[in-house]
Amino acid sequence: MKHEFIYEALPTRVVFGDGKLAALPAEIEKLGAQRALVLSTPAQADWAGEVAKVLGQKCAGIFSQATMHTPVEVTLQAMEQVKKLEADCVVGLGGGSTIGLGKAIALRTGLPQIAVPTTYAGSEMTPILGQTENGIKTTLRDALVLPKTVIYDVSLTLSLPPALSATSGLNAMAHAVEALYAQDRNPIVSLMAEEGIAALAQALPGVIADPQDRQARAQAQYGAWLCGICLGSAGMALHHKLCHVLGGTFDLPHAETHAIMLPHTAAYNAPEAPQAMHRAARALKADNVAEGLWALAERIKAPRALKDIGMPESGIDKATELALKNPYWNPRPLTDKDIRALIRRAWAGEAPL
Ligand code: NAD
């Protein structure tokens, strides 16, 4: 255990349970708001319509153009709706893309936001916002973007396709694995990290076998909540840096990239973070973290090669160069040779070393 640390709880109200979407009108009232702008992606526009029905008078309108990486031009369009409809709060219903839009609006207006997550990405529990302008993605941390309230309703995750459930679950686990060896780790967050990994490792095979299994889904969502807290509370390292570089440079899908990289980044850091890896392995019920993650990825049929999700082999050099530029703090020093080898293995889909 680390005997010197700082712990700061993030003040989000969490309402967790099957059917809890019904609590949305009361939660809006609790915030002192009356007119919510409901946000979604185009793919989830029907859901936003259903939520508008639940809200009745409390719905100011719907904006269904949320998209990956929170482009500023989309945020500005949504802001026009906020103004025109005189909305006094936002409800982000969806995955990290929709919740990112809610955060971008909150940053610019100070309006309270309620997040209703439908994936396992964890954005709802963080004060972090990534935005894209002129093709460049920048990330900021600001208390204003942390949702005031989060409603976790398992029924909204039943439709998450098995493939995305698997990769999104591994994306969540990556937050917890990195929190365990973070420079600013602390005992509370480490407890949540270990529990989050264990819950997801146990739940995901059941979710993939039967996406309608409410018990497995609820356990996965519980794990994703804990992993989201880890992301919001501890500094991330090599894994998140590499995924940021790979996703941004080659436009790779977010959850898949995390899922493929995680066994490799865990293997890389294992020699320099033995205690953290012991805890992660215990949560995975494995002798070794990288092997445990690799086996889990196979079991839940997650992709295991960057070449299969659109990264060109010629990109390995560029990715290595960018990964070594302004690196995040990492328990193991980074060398060009080692990082290049790691990316190459992940690109080819070879087992972690
Ligand atoms: P996403 O929000 O882009 O969703 C992927 C697709 O799945 C979308 O078309 C969406 O409509 C659909 N979908 C979502 N939930 C569904 C469900 N239950 N059933 C059917 N379809 C569903 O994917 P994501 O992985 O959740 O989020 C990725 C984005 O979030 C990235 O831009 C990433 O950078 C960001 N993110 C930010 C943070 C943060 O703390 N700032 C944390 C994690 C992710």
Image: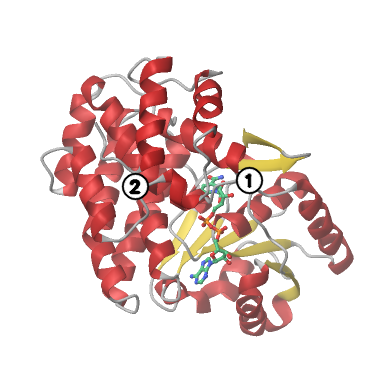
Instruction: Say what amino acid the circle numbered 2 marks.
Output: Met
Looking at the image, in which quadrant does ligand 1 appear?
A: bottom right
Question: How many numbered marks have been drawn onto this rendered protein structure?
Answer: 2
State the residue position of label 2.
173
State the residue position of label 1.
145
Circle 1 crowding by C-alpha within 10 Å: few under 14, some 14–19, many from 20: many
Residue 308 % position (x, y): 44, 51
Q: Mark 2 or mark 1: which comes first in sequence? A: 1
The answer to whether 243 appears left or right of 18 in the picture is right
In this rendered view, identify the residue nearer to me: 275 or 238.
238
Instruction: Say what amino acid the circle numbered 1 marks.
Output: Val
Residue 233 % position (x, y): 44, 37
Residue 117 % position (x, y): 51, 63
Q: Residue furthest front?
A: 314
Q: Is residue 289 visible?
A: yes
| Disc 1: residue Cβ within 8 A of ligand 1's nearest atom | yes
The answer to whether 94 appears left or right of 38 in the picture is left
* 111 w.r.t. 9: above or below: below
In this rendered view, identify the residue nearer to me: 299 or 110.
299
Residue 168 % position (x, y): 42, 56
